[in-house]
Amino acid sequence: MIVMKFGGTSVQDAKAIERAAAIVQERLPQKPVVVVSAMAKVTDQLLAMARAAGNCDRKNALKLCRALQERHYDTAGELLGTALFTRFHGDLATDFETLDDLLRGIAAVGELTPRTTDYVAAFGELLSSRIVTAAFSALGMDSSLVDSRECIVTDTAHTRAAPLFEETNERLRSKVSPLLTAGKVPVMGGFIGSTKAGITTTIGRGGSDYSAAIVGAGLDAERIEIWTDVDGMMTTDPNLCRDARRIKIISFDEAAELAYFGAKVLHPATVLPAVQKNIPVYVLNSRNPTCEGTQITARAPRCRNPFKAIAVKKRVTIVDVAAARMQLAHGFLRAIFETFDRHKAAVDVVTTSEVSVSLTLDSTESIPALAADLSKLADVKYEGRKAIVCLVGENLRDTPGIVGCVFSELNDVNIRMISQGASEINLTFVIEEDAVPEVVRRLHKKFFSDLDPEVFA
Ligand code: ADP
Ligand code: ASP
Ligand code: MG
């Protein structure tokens, strides 16, 4: 069997869902399990209505919900035609009644917890998987809706829950495998799961890629296909640099590093379950399905170029923690990192000196509270509007002088932090967010003009 995951843009409207159906149809002999994201932007809209309800703004929450309902009804209507839609309509209506009740409940209490946030956010994938299943059936495929909450079992860390693999694999085998044996196409929503007690959870933003990998690993897939809106993993975000080129083949390690540092084409956790089982992953374009995309494999092929790609992570804050001289003694670093841990703040880049430590955090973290806590240990300063730029490539290991080559290209740029060596395959630095387009353009021109045709398209 294979897993085919379609992202938000690949199911964003009736035309996109029809394209996805045609792609799945081609693969029927390979026994696909289909994993879908919410329709594009729907998760953001659901979170916005949850927040409105949490602020007691019931009217606005329900208004946003009506717009969402209309979009889903329109899409289903267009895909199914009047006769089928009339029959299907009741299922969608029930979902929206439940969502309305939920929003009213949140607004009445005026409190939005991580648990209720997950309950609201899950509707995106619940609805899209329902519509996609109905559309596939209408187009002549024998498809079957699987409620992911009955298969993907997670811990209780709402909004970024971690899968419990043993339980999940067991459920996948008992609920999904029989459908494949019966010749059906199972369709599941990505991103969502539930605790052992049956409470709805989500596994982190962009998590449908991860769901695809969990399903693929659990069912021993021959391959996992991530269908998106670009031709594959590119040498940099094509929205940032028009010269970005397709990477034909990349190693798991390189792909994971790129994903972690902002190449959102693939969720960072995606590759792990696949790596562990040596399942190849492909990134493909649902608008250009004949393009070969990017193959992610256990070992990187030999490549003439030092780097495979440049990733950028924006909206980053630098936190500087400075101790008085001689204070940076035993236990200081531990105390600092324990503080980050208590606040569940994920640190990306770290640099140290005798008296200070600098770190970067996502600007979305609650930094003032963290800084207040840290200031009990040392002087703390923080500064937002920074970006992490990360050059990735396995050849970095044995290309002498490469670091000098990179920075001589940027000698007029204010570089705030530099980190190299941690994984041996990335060179990472922090700059002002405003400088990103120019820095990426220059580095791309320098390192991706003359490309190895074996590795790049
Ligand atoms: P989906 O909805 O299919 O999951 P995402 O929006 O999560 O799609 O990811 C696809 C997007 O990732 C692309 O539209 C592109 O803008 C962005 N992206 C960032 N870096 C890269 C890269 N190196 N290669 C390809 N796409 C990238
Ligand atoms: N719909 C979810 C999100 O937007 C998951 C995903 O699309 O991967 O974060
Ligand atoms: Mg994505």
Image: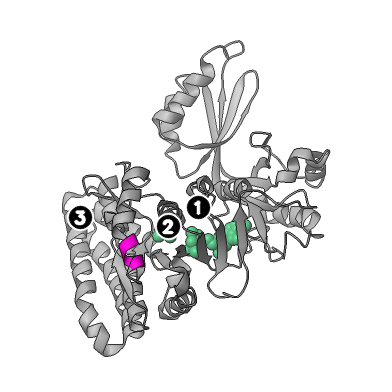
Look at the magenta stretch and give its main secondary structure.
helix
| Secondary structure state at the residue bearing disc 1 | loop
In which quarter of the view is residue 245 placed?
Answer: bottom right
Q: Residues within 10 Å of mark 2 (few under 14, many from 20)?
A: many
**Ligand 2 contact, mark 2 (Cβ < 8 Å):** yes
User: Which residue matches tag 1?
Assistant: 267
Q: Is residue 114 left or right of residue 213?
A: left
> Depth check: 17 or 383 in front?
17
User: Which residue matches tag 2?
Assistant: 208
| Secondary structure state at the residue bearing disc 2 | helix
Q: Quadrant of the C terminus?
A: bottom right
Q: Amino acid at mark 1?
A: His
Residue 223, compared with residue 320, is above or below; it is below
> Depth check: 408 or 31 in front?
31
* Residue numbers of the magenta segment: 177-181
Q: Position of residue 400 (x, y in %)?
A: 83, 38
Query: Mark 2 or mark 1, which is nearer the start of the sequence?
Result: 2
User: Which residue matches tag 3?
Assistant: 107
The Cα–Cα distance between marks 1 and 3, rounded to whole angstroms, is 32 Å
| Figure quadrant, ligand 2 | bottom left
Residue shown at 73% from the left, 59% from the top: 455
Residue shown at 51% from the left, 45% from the top: 276
Q: Amino acid at mark 2?
A: Ser
> Depth check: 439 or 39 in front?
39
Tell me, yes or no, whether the two marked residues, 1 and 2, touch with CB atoms within 8 Å.
yes
**Residue 52 falls within the magenta-colored stretch:** no
**Residue 179 falls within the magenta-colored stretch:** yes
The Cα–Cα distance between marks 3 and 2, rounded to whole angstroms, is 28 Å
In which quarter of the view is residue 148 placed?
Answer: bottom left
The Cα–Cα distance between marks 1 and 2, rounded to whole angstroms, is 8 Å
Q: Position of residue 351 (x, y in %)?
A: 63, 29
**Ligand 3 contact, mark 1 (Cβ < 8 Å):** yes
